[in-house]
Image: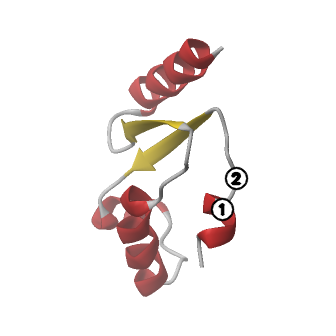
Amino acid sequence: RYRRIESASPDVLIRLHVPVELALLRKPDHNPEAVKRKVAATPKLRFEGSRIVDVDASKPLDQVMVSVKKAVWDSL
């Protein structure tokens, strides 16, 4: 299912990691099984030639944004 996504080759990929429980709290209208699959699949995604930055998205939004912005700026 994610093969087409993995065929892209971005300069930097920011993977946002969040526990299933928190993802379900944030998106209560989403299918719980689909959320579980997405959370499990995220760390397995590989992008040949791309710098991957893993961000803990369970932290407060301002901290997540700082991490994401830093990753973007570092890649410029």
Amino acid at dot 1: Ile
Residue at the image position 47 percent from the left and 19 percent from the top: 66
Q: Which mark is residue 8?
A: 2
**x then y, percent, for residue 8:** 70, 53
Q: Position of residue 67 (x, y in %)?
A: 44, 24
As drawn, 41 above or below 59: below
Q: Which residue is mark 1?
A: 5
Asked if residue 33 is positioned above or below residue 49 in the image, the reply reads: below
Query: Which of the pair 2/57 is nearer the observer?
Result: 2
Dot 1 lies on which element?
helix
Residue at x 47%, y 59% (from the top left corner): 45
Looking at the rendered image, the quarter that the C terminus falls into is top right
Horizontally, residue 16 falls left or right of residue 48, namely left
Disc 1 crowd, CA 10 A, few/some/many (<14, 14-19, 20+): few
Scheme of image coloration: secondary structure
Proximity of marks 2 and 1: CB atoms separated by less than 8 Å: yes
Q: At which x and y percent is residue 74?
A: 54, 14
Q: Horizontally, is 51 left or right of 24 in the view? A: right
Quadrant (top left, top right, bottom left, bottom right) of the N terminus: bottom right
Q: Residue at x 39, y 39 (%)?
A: 54
